[in-house]
Image (cartoon, helix red, strand yellow):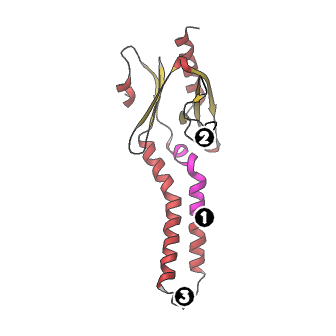
Amino acid sequence: MSQLGKYLRQDEKILWSGKPEIIPFIFSRYAGLSLFGFIWLIFILLMITSMPIASAQPFPFMFYIAFFILFGLCIALAPLLVEILRYRNTEYAITNQRIIAQTGVIGLDTRFVELDKIQEVYVTVGLLDKIYGTGSIIAVTAGYVPVETPSRYGMLVRPAFRAVKNPYEVQRLLQEAMKERSGA
């Protein structure tokens, strides 16, 4: 049973629920930043190994090297750690009345969107999504309030249902639920 069941109304039932696939979920957002961190680390380590061993380096120099290594580790690993923690708390559901998306690193952010408020549903498939058979389902509501998509101000936020297995099937199910809800 879905953890989102506690948010259901009395006459509401879950049509679909799921979690994202872990690899595309974790690596789709900050892969570039992590890659930069690993390249940074390789560059620093190559610099260190190319230094003459015979010459004793003064303490401040070694302190700077340690700082740059720590900086590279933070750039490479912190975004991945955040996404792993976010993955643990991420779950999606489509009910006969609304969609529910829950995510968060420490606290939980739960978003509810009524099916009759959704105007457009589309799927995006990136490179990792192609490899893992996943995609993101994005729902746009009336008044251009996207459900966790890039805003018109350029701020990047998450797609509604990110890294979902069989995204076109989930999109079809959502559109059928929308049609039933509207009575069309």
Q: Please name the residue that numbered disc 2 is placed on.
A: 129
Kindly report the secondary structure that dominates the magenta region of the rendered protein: helix
Q: CA distance from mark 2 to mark 3?
A: 46 Å
Residue 62 position in % (x across, y down)? 49, 80
Q: Please name the residue that numbered disc 1 is placed on.
A: 39
Residue 21 position in % (x across, y down)? 51, 40
Relative to 125, is 108 on the left or the right? left
Task: Count residues near mark 1 (Cα–Cα under 10 Å), then give few for <14, some for 14-19, many for 20+.
Answer: some
Relative to 16, is 156 on the left or the right? right
Residue 69, visible in the rendered structure: yes
Task: Count residues near mark 2 (Cα–Cα under 10 Å), then give few for <14, some for 14-19, many for 20+.
Answer: many
The amino acid at mark 1 is Ile
Quick one: SS at disc 3?
Answer: loop
Q: First in sequence: mark 2 or mark 3?
A: 3
- In the picture, the quarter occupied by the C terminus is top right
Quick one: SS at disc 2?
Answer: helix
In the image, is residue 158 above or below residue 175?
Answer: below
Residue at 48% x, 47% y is: 83
Q: Which residues are magenta?
A: 23-39
Residue at 53% x, 60% y is: 75
Foreground mark, 2 or 3, reads 3
Which quarter of the picture shows residue 43?
bottom right
Which quarter of the picture shows residue 145?
top right
**Residues under numbered marks 2 and 3 in contact, where contact means CB atoms less than 8 Å apart:** no
Magenta stretch holds residue 26: yes
- In the picture, the quarter occupied by the N terminus is top left
Q: First in sequence: mark 3 or mark 1?
A: 1
Q: Please name the residue that numbered disc 3 is placed on.
A: 53
Relative to 153, is 104 on the left or the right? left
Which residue reaches farthest top? 183
Residue 66 position in % (x across, y down)? 48, 74
Q: CA distance from mark 3 to mark 1?
A: 23 Å
